[in-house]
Amino acid sequence: MNPEALHTGLIETLSLTLVITSVAAVEMRRLKFSIVAYLCQALLIVGLLLSFASVNKALYWWAATALITKAVLTPWFLFRAIRGVDDRELKPVIGFGPSAVIVALLMMSFFRLTHGKVALLAPTGMAQLEVFRTNLAVASTVFALGLYAVLTRRDAIKAVIGLCLLENGVHLSLVSLAPSLPETALFGVATEVVVTVFLLLYVIGGVRQVFGSTDTFLLRELRW
């Protein structure tokens, strides 16, 4: 693959903006704003796929699929899940102040670690190029922030948003490590989690009907 065929400046800008949308999705306490932040991130992912498509035409298919699944269906499912209810997030395990500090530490740690040690994590010549180092560093950061949301948020809707961030981190890693392989697009489409999101939100709707809340701590009261 010829790196000069890529719009590296655009790719790095889109990639770094993913971190901002991840922080917004995790830390905003109004669920509708978190969903909007995720929607913005989904559009950025689509833009990144289109940017890489100059070296792999199959990525156009993945970009089209991602536009439908990430930027249309998943936000629609999420907005439908909070329709008619208070969209304020349930009080998380960690308060806003300490959480903001933890998020900042996660961002700096994962970005610097991955960017500086990319030769150990991805020992390929292409991964050493700055645009791919940045992408992989951003991917690990987005993944870490998504995992943090899943582990520390009591609100099940916010945990689902965290799962979506995990997916985006994985997909950014995939397209950064193997942008020119036709199989990359196929694997990316196959690992879209939109069906999982739909099923999780369906279960969450049932939990809300039974307990009147989407607090994941209430799941402890469920019995077979």
Image (cartoon, rainbow, N blue to C red):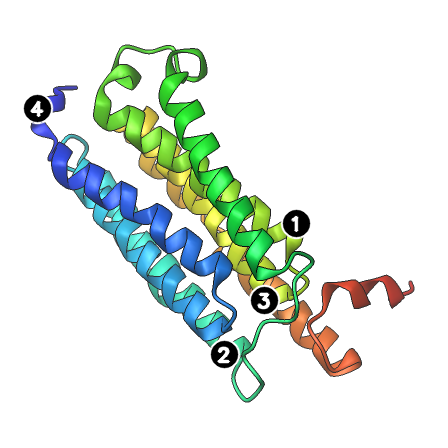
Tell me which residue sits at (46%, 31%) in the image: 110
Measure how far apart labels 2 and 4 are at the Cα level: 43 Å
Residue 104 vertical position relative to residue 89 in the rendered view, above or below: above
The residue that mark 3 highlights is 157
Measure how far apart labels 2 and 1 are at the Cα level: 23 Å
Q: Amino acid at mark 4?
A: Glu
Give the SS element for disc 3.
helix
Q: Nearer the viewer, residue 49 or 87?
A: 87
CB contact under 8 Å: marks 2 and 1? no
The residue that mark 2 highlights is 80
Tell me which residue sits at (30%, 24%) in the image: 133
Give the SS element for disc 1.
helix
Q: Nearer the viewer, residue 153 or 206?
A: 153
Q: Amino acid at mark 2?
A: Arg
**Mark 2 against mark 3, which lies toward the viewer?**
3
In the rendered view of the protein, which quadrant contains the N terminus? top left
Measure how far apart labels 2 and 3 are at the Cα level: 11 Å
Q: Nearer the viewer, residue 47 or 158?
A: 158
| Rendering coords of residue 122 (x, y %) | 40, 16
Label 2 or label 3, whichever comes before in sequence order? 2
For disc 4, the neighbor class at 10 Å (few under 14, some 14 to 19, many from 20) is few
Label 4 or label 1, whichever comes before in sequence order? 4
